[in-house]
Image (cartoon, rainbow, N blue to C red):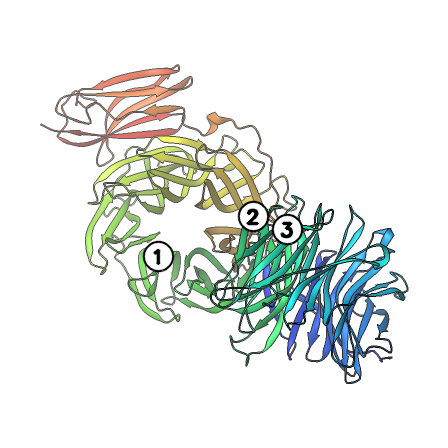
Amino acid sequence: MKYKLLCLFTITLTSGLISSNSFENSFDFGGIESAHDVIFHQGEYYFVGKTDTDLLIGCVDSMGELDRYSVYFYGDSVNGMAIEEGVNDGLVVLANIHAAIGDSILIMHIDEDLTTVYGTITFGADSDYVSMRGYDLLLNNIPIFSNGYLIAGELEDISGYTTPMLLNINDTTFTEEWRRQYFVDVSGGLRGVCANQQSGMLGMIGFEIAASGYNDVMMIIGFQEGIFCTKRLFGDPLLDEFGLGIAETPDGFLLSSSEPRSVGIGSDLWLINWRLSDSSIIWDSLYTIADSMHHEAREIVNQSDSGFVLGGLTSYFGLIQGVFCLKINQLGQQQWVNYYDQSIQRGAFSINKADQGFILAGSSFDTIWSSGTEDVYLLKVDSLGNLHQECYSVYGDPATDERSTSMAISEQSGYILGGNKQVNRDDQDFYLVKTDPWGGLIWDDYYGAGGTDEILHSVSYSEILGQYILLGQTIEQDTVKSVLCYVLPDGTLNQFSTGDPHTTLNCFLEFEENKAKGFILIGSTQSTTKDTIINIEVKRYDNMGNPVWQYIYTIPGDQIPNNATDLQFINDALGGFILIGSTQSTTKDDLHNLFLMNIHPDGQLGWQCSYFPGEGYGLIQEEMNVYSTGYALGNDSVKDVFVMCLSGDSVPAWTSIPDLVGDQVGYDLMLIEDTLVVSGYSRGSIHSPHNYDNVMIMKFDKLSGDYLGMAELFEDGNQRGYDCFYTYDNCYAINGFTDYNGTDPADALFMKTYPPYSPVVSVEEELPVNINDYVQIAELYSPQPAVFNDRTLIGFTIKSNCLVDVAIYDITGREVRVLANSVGFSPGYYEYVWDSRDNSGVTVSPGTYFIRLTVNQQNLMEKAVLIK
C-alpha cells in the first residue's frame, strides 16, 4: 500500500517574548486538532497530532509560543501518534493512516525546521489482517533487542478482532527488522512498550477482551527481539480495566490503568508495581484526583529519586474535563499532585521530561460540551508540577513616553498599572493600563486637566467604591496641588479634583484601605509662612470618604521631609500605622536620610526616627514585625539595597545591606513564607552586559536578614521594576518601564517571571560589607520616665568609637537644649539627665519634646512629655 506525500503548508512564526520555563497554551489551526505526543529537543518543544484529517507536526519555543508547523495530506485520514529524536539527525514521527480498505502505519523522518522530509515509509497488515495500527514509539538503545525503534500496536482481522503486535524498524533505513504477534483469547492490543535494562526484558502494556466481554489490563513480557515470554492479566473479570502506560522499575515494571469505582460514578487511577523475578505484585494503589471523574494516565516518567511522575486527564461520561500531574515515590505514596484550572476543558495524552520539568500534550475545547472546537493543548510545568505563566508586555505609544510606577490587583484578578504619559512636549497626564492576569491589554487611557502636569504616585482599587483611586499631584507653573482621581472599571473618568496648595497635601503618595476604618492619605505640605519649611501631612477618612482627622508633623533639627512614600497599618492593640520616606538636610542638598514615623490611630505621633544616609520606599508587616526597603548610600556614593526589621519600636531588630557591585535600589517588598523579596532595579552589576538599569529581584531571610541572592532581567535599554506581587502560579508580577535602547521614549512595562528557572537570571556574589557605612552603631533607649515633671534620664549605647551629638527639640523642630556636641565616645553605655531647661537655663513649657542622638550622620529619636 503506497501513499503520495503532499505537504499542504509549512508556516514559521516569530515571537518577541523573553524566554520562559513554564506555560499553558492552546493552538487553533482552523479545524479539529489534538496533540498525541510531545518531546523536548534542542531547547524547543515538538508535538505531533492531527488537524481534521491531516497529519500535524509543530514546534513551540521555550515561552510556549507557536514558532512553526507543517500539515501533511495523504488522501485519507492520518493521525500523528508519537514523536522521537532521530538517531543521527532530525525527528521521527509515528502516525496511523485510516483508509476505507484498512489502516496502516506511517513513519516519517523530518528535519527540525519541519520543512524537509528525509523520507517516509508505510507498514501494512499481511494477508491474515486488514489493518495495522501503532500507538507507541520507543527509541531502543539496548543492543540485545536490536537497535532501532520499537512500535507497540495491534493488528485487526476482517471480523474486527485485534491482536497485540510489536514491530522493530531500523534506525537508519527505517525498514522492518522483525515483527511479533501475541495471541489472546478473544481480542486485544498494545498501547505502550519499555525495556528493563537490568533484566534485559521487554515489557508491553495493553488490554485483552475476555470471554465475558470485559477488558482486563494485559502485560506481555518479551525476551530478545520481542520473543514471547509470559502474559499476565490484572483486574476484576466483571469490570472494564484498560492498560495504558508502562515504565521500568529496578525489579520489573510499573503499569497504569483505570479502576471503576464500586460506589459512585467514575474510576480511579490504578497503578501496579510488578516484580519480574517471582511474577508477583509488589504493591498496587488507587489515586483519586477529582471526584465523580474517570482518570487516565497514558504515560509514566521515571525520576532520578526512583519515583515516578504521571500526567493524564479526567473525563465525565466520555467528555474530557481536566489535566492532572501526579508524583509518587517508589513505594507508591503520593508526594504531590496538581489538577489544573478546571475552568478550561482540556486533557493530556502524553507527558515527557522537559527543561527542569515536564511537558504535557493533548486537546482543549472552547466549551464544556461537545459543540466546542478542539485545539492542540500544551502544558509545561516545573519539577513539582507547578505552572508559572510568565509574560513580558509593554504598553504605550512608541512616539511618546509612558511609565508605570504603581500597580494594584484589579477587580477581575488582573492588574491595573498606574503612571504617567507624555501628551505633548510640555504636558504629562495620569496614565492607566488595565490587563488580564497574563498581561494582555484590556484598555489603557490617560487623564489630565490640560496645560498642566499631572504626576501619579499611586493607584489602588477600592472594593467599597468599586473604582480605581489615583493619587498624585498637578503642577502649573510654580504651583503644586494634590490630585484625587476616581476611574470606573471600564476606564471612564468619574471624578478629578485638586486640593489647596497650602492647606492640603501636595502629593497623595500612597493609599491604604481598611473596610472598618476607611483610608489614609499621606504626603507633604509647604508652610504658609516659610517657603523652606515642608511638613508631613496625614489625613484619615472613614469608609464613606468623610474626613476623620488631619495632622501636620514637623521633623526636628536640620532635616526636612523630602518625601513620604509608603504607609503600613500595624496589626497590634493600638492599630496605628508606620510611614516611611526620607528627609533632606537643610544645609546639604544631596544628603538624604532614611526616615520612619509611627502614628497612633487618633493621629497622635508615636515616634519618629532618622537612620542612615539613603531613602525608604516600601513597607510590609507580619505580626509584630515591620520590614522596610529602599537604598542606603555608602561612603563611596554607591546605592545599596537595604532591608530593615522593626519589632515594636523604632530600634531595628536587624538591618541588612548587601554590598554588591554597582547600584541597587529597592522599591517594594513582599513576604513569601520565610523569605523577603525586594523588587527594584540594578545598574552595573558584575553580570550586567551593559550600563543600563535592569529589573531586579533580591531575596533575604526574614528571621536573620541574611542576603540570599539577586536575580536580574537583562534586556536592551533601561528597565526598572517598582511594585511586585506574588501570583497564584508562583510568579513575580512586576510593573515598571523600558526605553528599549537607553534613548527611545519609554513604554510602560508589565512582566511575570519565575526566577528559579529563568535563564535571564543571574545570582551575584556578595562582597564584604563595611557595616560601619550603614548599620546603626548606636542605640537610643526610651527616656526614664517618658512622662516627667522635672527631669528624665536619657540612656544610649555606643558600639564603636565615634563622635556623638545629643540634643532636645520641641514639637516645632526648634532646638532647645544641647547635651553633647561632637563628643568622642568609645563603645559602652552612657546616660544624660535632662532637667527640663533650655540652653539658657530657663525651664521650658510643658509639652512634647524629642531627644535626638546623632552618630556618624545617623539620627535616632525618642519622645518625652513634660507635665507640671
* Mark 2 or mark 1: whose residue is earlier in sequence: 2
Label 3: element kind: strand
Mark 3 residue crowding within 10 angstroms, few (<14) / some (14–19) / many (20+): many
Is residue 33 at all visible to an observer of this figure?
yes
What distance separates the C-alpha of mark 2 from that of mark 1?
59 Å
**Above or below, comparing residue 850 to residue 448 in the picture:** above
Point 24% across, 51% down: residue: 539
Residue 829 percent across, percent down from the top left = 33, 16
Please state the horizontal and vertical placement of residue 182, each as a whole percent of the image: 79, 65
Q: Residue 751 versus residue 34: which sits nearer the camera?
A: 34
Q: What label does residue 308 carry, if any? A: 3
Amino acid beneath label 1: Gln
Mark 1 or mark 3: name the one nearer the start of the chain.
Answer: 3
N-terminal label among 2 and 3: 3
Q: Is mark 2 on a helix, strand or loop?
A: loop
Residue denoted by label 1: 473
Q: What label does residue 333 carry, if any?
A: 2
- Of 813 and 646, which appears nearest the observer? 646
Callouts 1 and 3 close, C-beta under 8 Å: no
Q: Tell me which residue sits at (34%, 40%) in the image.
A: 623
Q: In this view, does 449 lie to the left or right of 225?
A: left
How many discs appear? 3
Give the answer, above or below, for where 453 lies relative to 539.
Answer: below
Q: Position of residue 215 (x, y in %)?
A: 65, 68
